[in-house]
């Protein structure tokens, strides 16, 4: 087979998008099928509100971008096209793919208003940053010299003896110029080619003798080398070239939204994988996933802290089992049961009444950990009644997903003279709020929830008991018998014990605390901390998600700007003064400086790890380094590799190695020695789970 034809065939198999030039790849068929076909027949340079007003978002990519593309470090082309379409879905917008002839056409298409976001492997360069704004980095690549096998390509001196041919306007030009400027060497012989030359064209040119050498990304080179013994890889000219998406410079709202989305999407995707797990598998993973709803009895957030009666009992259970508790929030009871069945969580803990009907659905209940009565609730000005027979056409508002609904229907069929109004998806607190506003005359709720609401809604009362006591229990699947048995043993031991009684009184008896928690409860419309505006501004500067920074800030200082650690770290982000000084900050107890020093340090740490870390994993490694230092984290990565774990994945891999670095057998052989590994392990888990809680609560 002629060499040129062979090269063409292999190129079709290994076609990739260069981060600095045109690409000859095909559109992702999977992504294209998901995209709604809508014509982009308008020109607009507006920011996010204007984009939303059009009902569509226009995503620019090179033609033939990614059907057979090799996976890059971080995200393969088809994957990030799908991620971009999920961004559109979150915004409620249709997707329009705007394909241009090559990389050279992307920035003009964007700035002329024919597209809204560039979605491809585009290298971040100084020249490009003058024309467009880049999103948070989606990956990092290493740039290397490639040339004929008979050439020396290992040092800068070697490169001065040959011509390096690269397409004009590429990121590689900037890298080579920076390399020679930093080394003080004579000018390299850089031959600029026309734009639009693909990777395969460059390699073919080297094989045919048209070019001596070129520059490509290392992952591309690694894919080509096995097929071409006559070319070789030379020195690295850029260790960590960031690649990203891009928007117009005057679209800051869109940029902020994308940056926050990229972080939240990848953390969610890596954390919430559907998996029906046995108790032994839960124990092996070290993580128990609690499915619940946001309500004042089961689970809520108070000024950054995770709280709730169900949450605290389940947290106690998890601690005793050596497990970390994660919360997965749903909007309704049916969603909880569906998520349990899919394996999205391990146990439902959300004030669920155990009933034969639910048992028949295939649900299994633990021993009751709370006994309650269903109560008919009314306003204070409503006359006292002792039976439903006394009602005469009054309206009862109820959520049809609850056990109360069927009970009321049965009473009505037996002659009850009242009207049932359905309010799907509403919580007890929402129904009682509507009751107080005269939306209807009565509602039905469990007595423990009524106790909470009476402390906050002064105009409501429990008119009468509807049932005898019924059991509130946790819910598992039929195949989780060992988990059920373990939960039963925990409840039997704790029920009405000291811890149980203190926790019960905290949420259902102490009206002062109930008021306090409800007043400071985090909702979609509330802030997370007194420093939200500061955090948003500073996080935006570095392309971070402000909610993640806030979750870390709570972990560090519980929002106390005067906090000081035993090691001398100060302020909201607990930064050491000598570290802060390197970033130009000295008054760490001032919130604006304390937060600024923290996010600057986070940004610096982010660039200290290997280029092939995925987006979510880079977050976890950076947080671990913030707590324990990059040296100890690198030791843990090295030990993980030795033990057969994945050194580029934190949970259940590098975190296991980190725990071992507190044992002499392991830390004596490590470069940076002893570290109390449980601290960074707990630190990363706690911040991730608090961040997920913020996302689940719909905080924007």
Image (tube, grey):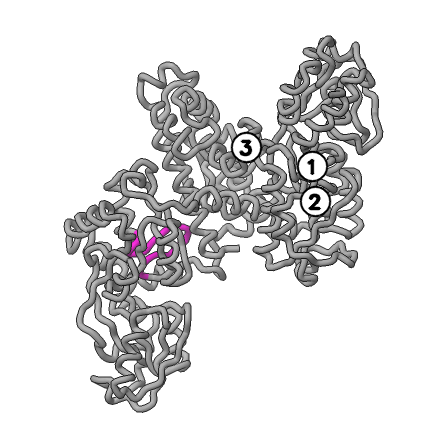
Residue 310 covered by magenta stretch: yes
Residue sitting nearer the eye, 255 or 473: 473
Per the image, label 2 sits on a secondary structure element best described as: strand
Residue at 76%, 56% (x, y): give it. 44
Which residue lies at the image location 48% right of the left edge and 45% below the top edge? 269
Mark 1 or mark 3, which is nearer to you? 1
Left or right: residue 266 compared with residue 437:
right
SS at mark 1 in the image? strand
Between residue 129 and residue 191, name the one nearer to us: 191
Residue at the location (29% across, 70% down)?
403
| Left or right relative to 251: residue 657 | left
> Real-space Cα distance between discs 1 and 3?
19 Å
Whole-number angstrom distance, CA of label 3 to CA of label 2 = 23 Å
Horizontal side of 574 relative to 260 (left or right) equals: left
Residue 274 % position (x, y): 41, 47
Q: Pick whichever of labels 3 and 2 is earlier in the sequence.
A: 2
Among the 4 quarters of the image, the one containing residue 441: bottom left
643 in the magenta segment: no
Q: Could you tell me if the residues under marks 1 and 3 are in contact, i.e. CB atoms within 8 Å?
A: no
Could you give the CA–CA distance between mark 1 and mark 2, rounded to whole angstroms?
8 Å
N-terminal label among 1 and 3: 1
**Which residue, given by chain and number where applicable, does mark 2 sit on?**
118
Between circles 3 and 2, the one closer to the viewer is 2
In the picture of the structure, the residue carrying the numbered disc 3 is 606
Point out the stretch of residues depicted in magenta.
297-311
């Amino acid at each position: 087979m002629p060499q040129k034809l062979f090269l063409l065939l292999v190129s079709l198999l290994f076609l990739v998008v260069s981060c600095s030039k045109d690409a000859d790849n095909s559109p992702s068929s999977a992504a294209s099928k998901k995209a709604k076909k809508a014509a982009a027949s308008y020109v607009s340079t507006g920011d996010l509100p204007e984009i939303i007003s059009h009902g569509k978002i226009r995503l620019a990519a090179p033609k033939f971008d990614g059907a057979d593309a090799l996976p890059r470090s971080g995200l393969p082309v088809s994957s990030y096209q799908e991620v971009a379409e999920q961004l559109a879905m979150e915004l409620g917008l249709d997707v329009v793919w705007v394909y241009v002839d090559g990389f050279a056409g992307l920035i003009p298409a964007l700035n002329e208003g024919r597209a809204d976001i560039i979605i491809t492997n585009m290298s971040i360069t100084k020249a490009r940053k003058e024309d467009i704004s880049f999103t948070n980095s989606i990956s990092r690549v290493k740039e290397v010299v490639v040339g004929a096998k008979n050439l020396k390509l290992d040092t800068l001196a070697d490169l001065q003896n040959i011509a390096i041919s690269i397409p004009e306007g590429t990121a590689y030009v900037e890298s080579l110029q920076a390399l020679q400027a930093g080394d003080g060497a004579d000018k390299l012989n850089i031959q600029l080619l026309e734009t639009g030359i693909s990777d395969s064209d460059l390699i073919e040119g080297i094989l045919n003798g048209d070019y001596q050498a070129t520059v490509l990304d290392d992952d591309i080179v690694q894919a080509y080398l096995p097929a071409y013994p006559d070319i070789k890889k030379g020195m690295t000219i850029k260790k960590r070239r960031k690649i990203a998406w891009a928007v117009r410079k005057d679209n800051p709202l869109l940029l902020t939204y994308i940056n926050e989305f990229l972080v939240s999407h990848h953390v969610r995707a890596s954390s919430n994988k559907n998996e029906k797990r046995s108790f032994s598998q839960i124990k092996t993973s070290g993580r128990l996933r609690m499915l619940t709803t946001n309500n004042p009895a089961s689970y809520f957030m108070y000024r950054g802290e995770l709280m709730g009666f169900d949450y605290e009992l389940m947290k106690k259970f998890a601690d005793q089992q050596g497990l970390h508790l994660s919360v997965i929030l749903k909007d309704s009871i049916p969603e909880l049961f569906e998520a349990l069945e899919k394996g999205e969580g391990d146990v439902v803990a959300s004030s669920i009444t155990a009933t034969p009907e639910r048992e028949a659905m295939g649900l299994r209940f633990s021993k009751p950990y709370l006994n309650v009565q269903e109560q008919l609730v009314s306003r204070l000005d409503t006359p006292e009644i002792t039976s439903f027979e006394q009602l005469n056409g009054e309206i009862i508002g109820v959520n049809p997903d609850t056990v109360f609904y069927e009970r009321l229907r049965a009473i009505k069929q037996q002659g009850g003279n009242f009207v049932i109004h359905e309010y799907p998806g509403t919580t007890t607190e929402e129904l009682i709020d509507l009751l107080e506003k005269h939306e209807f005359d009565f509602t039905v709720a469990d007595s423990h929830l009524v106790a909470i609401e009476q402390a906050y809604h002064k105009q409501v009362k429990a008119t009468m008991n509807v049932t005898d006591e019924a059991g509130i229990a946790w819910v598992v699947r039929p195949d989780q018998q060992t988990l059920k048995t373990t939960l039963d043993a925990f409840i039997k031991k704790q029920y009405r014990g000291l811890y149980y009684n203190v926790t019960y009184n905290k949420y259902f008896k102490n009206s002062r605390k109930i008021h306090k928690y409800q007043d400071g409860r985090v909702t979609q419309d509330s802030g997370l901390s007194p420093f939200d505006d500061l955090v948003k501004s500073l996080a935006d500067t570095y392309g971070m998600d402000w909610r993640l920074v806030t979750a870390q800030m709570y972990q560090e200082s519980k929002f106390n700007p005067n906090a000081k650690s035993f090691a001398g770290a100060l302020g909201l982000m607990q930064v050491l003064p000598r570290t802060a000084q390197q970033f130009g900050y000295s008054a760490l107890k001032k919130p604006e400086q304390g937060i600024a020093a923290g996010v600057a340090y986070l940004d610096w740490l982010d660039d200290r790890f290997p280029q092939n870390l995925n987006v979510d994993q880079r977050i976890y490694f950076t947080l671990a380094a913030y707590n324990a230092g990059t040296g100890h984290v690198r030791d843990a990565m090295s030990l993980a590799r030795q033990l057969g774990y994945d050194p580029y994945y934190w949970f259940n891999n590098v975190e296991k190695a980190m725990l071992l670095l507190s044992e002499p057998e392991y830390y004596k052989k490590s470069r940076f020695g002893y570290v109390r590994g449980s601290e960074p392990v707990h630190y990363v888990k706690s911040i991730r789970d608090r961040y997920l809680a913020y996302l689940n609560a719909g905080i924007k």
